[in-house]
Amino acid sequence: MSATAHPTTDVPPSTGSTAVPASPPSSSRRRGLLGALPPAVVLVVLAFVPFFLAEDPTNILTRILVFGLFAVSLDLLVGITGLPSLGHAAYFGVGAYTAALVADHWTPSAPTPVLMAAAAGAVAAVLTGWLAVRSHGVFFLMLTLAIGEITSQLALQLDDVTGGSNGMSVPSVRFGSEPFDADFRIAYTYWYVLVVFVIAFAAMWLIARSPFGLALRGIRDNEGRMRSLGYTPFRYKYVAYVLAGGFAGLAGGLFAQVNRLVSPVDAGFALSAITLLALVLGGAGTLWGPVLGMAVVVIVRDYYGPDLNGHGPLVLGIVFVIAVYVLPRGFAGIAGLLRTPRRRRDRSIVPGEERAA
């Protein structure tokens, strides 16, 4: 008895348009260059700001860079690591007071005060973070809030060192032994802040995109799974907490030299809260989005605030409510929507078709 043989045909995988081919090296390089172009253009424009802006707008932009750097440090903690802190201003205040003390009792020459401020912020985070990072959820929020309030109260009570409620004056920033020329002080101060901002932002950008940063994102999204893969979440979160504290201290040191006055308010809850607002406005987890959010906060509060008869916080509240409903992912979400169609077009291009084109 014979069985009917059914021939089998080996069909190779289809190479049609349904497959997603790998992008050729030339296309990847081109996308990399195009991705680097907008930041380069923004940096060039920012470098020439003092030449075409008046002193008041230049001062406002300087403050945006200072508080924007602080917002990025908080985003490293909140958006990248998933640790929403209510007391991050504590490290900003520690850095500000450290820079003030260094400038007053040692040297106001840049960059010594801000480097010491960054170190002080990191040390403060080392001392407080080991306890805070062990907690979760509401307990973490309450612990960080307590850290911020304790720091603010210490600054208020230690009036022999900090000046108490009157604050502490800070000598003007200088390079070497000579202060900035009075006619160009605002421009030089702006360039000084811009250089520090760019270096610090680039450092945090690299951290967020390093294997360490990817591990932080994994812990943020699913801590249990990362633990099962052999990671130790506490160590990663603790290091991120210390890094964020150091960058916050750096921002505080810049603030002290720009504002030339430090007070207990600069370490309190209000600054932490308004910076969290900037993260929501700009888009948490993007690093550059919080800078845009802080720009809105500073412009409304510091530039238009005096003309609003004390209604600046009300305007900020309205902007926040509108942003939550209209831009749930913040300003960074707009850029994401613009990039999505381009990525789809790139994926639909087959290497042979790209060469033919």
Image (cartoon, rainbow, N blue to C red):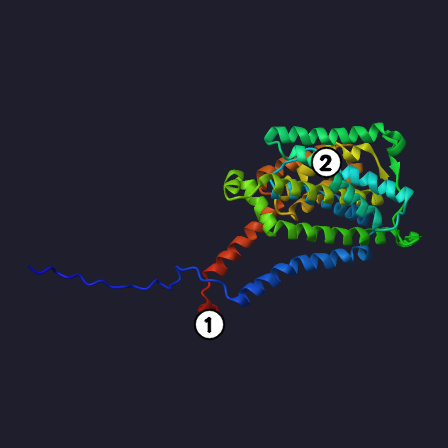
Left or right of 263, for residue 240: left
Amino acid bearing label 1: Ala
Looking at the image, which residue is at 56% across and 50% down? 336
The reply to whether residue 143 is visible in this rendering is yes
Pointer 2 residue: 127
Relative to 312, say whether 289 is above or below. Answer: below
Q: Does residue 191 appear to the left or right of 336 in the view shown?
A: right
In this view, the residue in front, 291 or 133, is 133
Number of numbered discs on residues: 2
SS class, disc 1 = helix
Q: Could you tell me if residue 284 is visible in this image?
A: no
Mark 2 burial class by Cα count in 10 Å: few <14, some 14-19, many 20+: few
Nearest the camera: 132 or 283?
Answer: 132
Q: Which tag is nearer the camera, tag 2 or tag 1?
A: 2
Q: Where is residue 320 in the image (x, y as percent from the top left)?
A: 65, 36
Compare residues 211 and 185 and report the one nearer the observer: 211
Name the residue beneath numbered marker 1: 356
Q: Give the image location of residue 309, x and y in percent.
A: 79, 33
